Image (cartoon, rainbow, N blue to C red):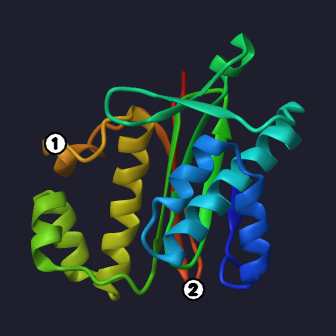
Amino acid sequence: MIYIDDKIQQYSTEEVAAWIAELPQWRREQVLAYKHEAGRRQSLLAYRLLCQGLREEYGITTPPDFTYHEHGKPYLSGERRLSSIHFSLSHCREAVACVINEQLCGIDIESTDRRVSDSLIRYSMNDEEQAEIAQAENPAQAFLRLWTKKEAVLKLLGTGIRDDMKDILADCPYGIETRETERYIISIAVSRA
């Protein structure tokens, strides 16, 4: 299941403060560690989406705790049944997103007005992808489509950005779905097995 909240700027400061106060201590500390209010809002709302999804899909009403693997990928900790539930969170200036699945999954969301540098394109895209971007009617949007797919796969794997990012989509064994709006592009990767 995919959950998206693209109204993150519409919540009042009072609502956000009340929601932060309701968080488990560990998550409150993570949210408040963000220097800027926008980061705190995004982190808070992504966690709220996860809680919503767990409640709606699995009847889980207690706030989830995370365990982190080697490269920082969070997993649900606690009850044994939670180990079969996978999730991924992402946020950008425009929206926050969460995917929950019984297979490994990853999600990435990016604002369509994100600036894209030539050096980032060269670093992250292979020759074929660079050509696709250069020939696109909207090169920045073409880049973001590919970037979100790559990020979603890397989040599924739990490895973070790595040296083989250029070719991560070649012969990719994962199902990848991309959605676009005027304000953001989102990609979801899910293991097929």
42 or 192: nearer the viewer: 42
Quick one: label 2, few (<14), some, or many (20+) residues within 10 Å? Answer: few
Q: Distance between the Cα atoms at labels 1 and 2?
A: 30 Å
Spot occupied by residue 64 in the image (x, y as percentages of width and height): 70, 35
Write down the residue under mark 2.
Answer: 182
Q: Position of residue 55 (x, y in %)?
A: 85, 40
The residue that appears at 74% across and 15% down in the rendered structure is 81
Which quarter of the figure has residue 83? top right
User: Is residue 83 left or right of 144 when viewed as pictured?
Assistant: right
Q: Secondary structure at mark 2?
A: loop
Residue drawn at point x = 34 percent, y = 62 percent: 146
The amino acid type of the residue labelled 1 equals Asp
Residue 14 shown left or right of residue 153 in the figure:
right
Q: Residue at x 64, y 32 (%)?
A: 65
Q: Residue furthest top?
A: 80
Check disc 2 and give the amino acid type: Glu
Depth check, front residue: 102 or 25: 25
Q: Residue at x 31, y 82 (%)?
A: 140
Q: Secondary structure at mark 1?
A: helix
Residue 145 is situated, as x and y percent measured from the top left of the image, at 40, 67
In the rendered view, would you say 188 is above or below 64? Answer: below
Per the image, the residue denoted by label 1 is: 164
Residue 157 occupies which quadrant of the picture? top left
